[in-house]
């Protein structure tokens, strides 16, 4: 089954989870499907990765664990959306509650899944998130082009 259309060549994903074995396993499973994968073991490490030389432009989607020590997933999500509003974030948790799902969606999460999640479901959600991000980026480019055209009197 093809998860990504030919126009969505090798999307890139940043995985964020404090459980190293889970992170390593999920990274391998996603990479086998020809997606580019980077990982971070904490919310702060994820933010540092996104900040480094505008690393956010290198990623299409962040897969973010909700329950982590220190900066939790909801705090990390808020920080990501503040600095990188177009970056799509899928929340993952083994400790889901209706309240945390609602909080994540209110804060701008693209979607929310329970751990362990079905890899096909996760890949489908990644695909939809990439499509949404790229469509939004295209609209921004079109709006900028219209502004330039209007300024030039076209």
Image: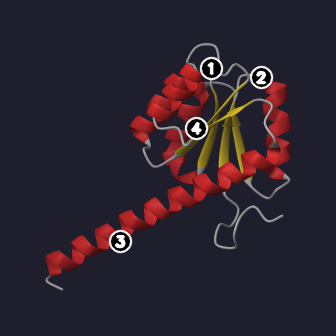
Total residue callouts: 4
Task: Name the residue carrying label 2.
Answer: 19
Q: State the CA–CA distance, disc 1 to disc 2.
A: 19 Å
Q: Earlier in the sequence, mark 1 or mark 2?
A: 2
Q: Nearer the viewer, mark 1 or mark 4?
A: 1
- The quarter of the rendered structure image containing the C terminus is bottom left
Q: Is residue 100 above or below residue 31?
A: above
- Please tell me which residue is depicted at 81% across the width and 45% down the height of the picture: 119
For disc 4, the neighbor class at 10 Å (few under 14, some 14 to 19, many from 20) is: some
Task: Name the residue carrying label 1.
Answer: 97
- Circles 1 and 2, Cβ within 8 Å, touching? The answer is no
Q: Nearer the viewer, residue 113 or 87?
A: 113
Task: Name the residue carrying label 4.
Answer: 49
As drawn, the residue found furthest toward the front would be 98
- Please tell me which residue is depicted at 78% across the width and 32% down the height of the picture: 23
- Residue 76 seen in render: no
Q: State the CA–CA distance, disc 4 to disc 2.
A: 18 Å
Q: State the CA–CA distance, disc 3 to disc 4.
A: 29 Å
């Amino acid at each position: 089954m093809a998860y990504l259309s030919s126009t969505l060549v090798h999307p890139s994903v940043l995985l964020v989870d404090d459980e190293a074995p889970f992170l390593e396993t999920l990274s391998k499973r996603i990479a086998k499907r020809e997606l580019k994968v980077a990982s971070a073991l904490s919310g702060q490490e994820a933010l540092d990765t996104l900040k480094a030389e505008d690393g956010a432009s290198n990623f299409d989607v962040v897969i973010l664990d909700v329950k982590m020590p220190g900066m939790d997933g909801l705090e990390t999500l808020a920080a990501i959306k503040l600095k990188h509003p177009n970056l799509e974030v899928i929340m993952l948790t083994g400790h889901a509650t209706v309240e945390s799902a609602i909080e994540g969606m209110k804060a701008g999460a693209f979607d929310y899944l329970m751990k362990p999640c079905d890899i096909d479901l996760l890949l489908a959600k990644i695909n939809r998130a990439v499509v949404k991000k790229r469509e939004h980026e295209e609209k921004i480019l079109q709006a900028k082009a219209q502004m330039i055209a209007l300024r030039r009197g076209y």
